[in-house]
Image (cartoon, grey):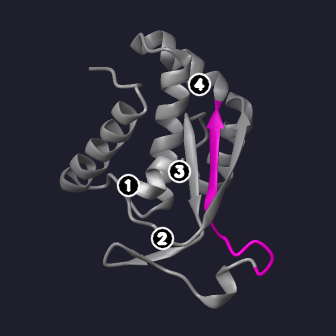
Amino acid sequence: MKLCVKKNGFSTPCEVYVTLTDNEGIRKLNREQRGIDRPTDVLSFPLLDYSEGKPRIEAGDIDPDSGRVCIGDIIISVEKALEQADEYGHSREREIAFLAVHGILHLLGYDHETKDDETVMFSMQESILEEMGLSVK
């Protein structure tokens, strides 16, 4: 997670909440939050807005005790991650790291709604995983 933040030049001390769940737990959240009644591998819930690629951090966003800003929550279905690791021939470690990196990039303002955005985000994912020694190449 720190590598994602560092590579994106996020200079404010920050934290992310990560929840590990199963397919039923993430299916419930996916249904409640996105109206999609099926399990998925990872969900991200960003707490910051971005303008021109930079986070808009207000004074109230910073925890006075820790000096950190919470950038959001990531929910990972370990059950789905293990299924995908087997399906794609990845190690379990690589698949869970991939989902965590994917999730935090969403918290940092990345998306893959357009082909151009997808290219940028997926390139960043692969660069981070490669630096972590978890590339599939």
Q: Is residue 90 left or right of residue 136?
A: right
Image quarter (top left, top right, bottom left or bottom right) of the C terminus: top left
Q: Give the percent coordinates (x, y) of residue 97.
A: 52, 32
Q: Which residue is mark 3?
A: 2
Q: Secondary structure at mark 2?
A: loop
Q: Which residue is mark 2?
A: 11
Kindly report the secondary structure that dominates the magenta region of the rendered protein: strand
Q: Nearer the viewer, residue 115 or 134?
A: 134
Q: Which residue is mark 4?
A: 80
For image coordinates 35% across by 25% down, the residue present is 135
| Labels 4 and 3 touching (C-beta < 8 A) | no
Give the mark nearest the N terminus, 4 or 3.
3
Furthest residue toward left: 116
Give the mark nearest the N terminus, 1 or 4.
1
Q: Which residue is mark 1?
A: 7
The magenta stretch spans which residues? Answer: 64-77
Amino acid type indicated by mark 1: Lys
For image coordinates 40% across by 26% down, the residue present is 133
For residue 70: magenta? yes
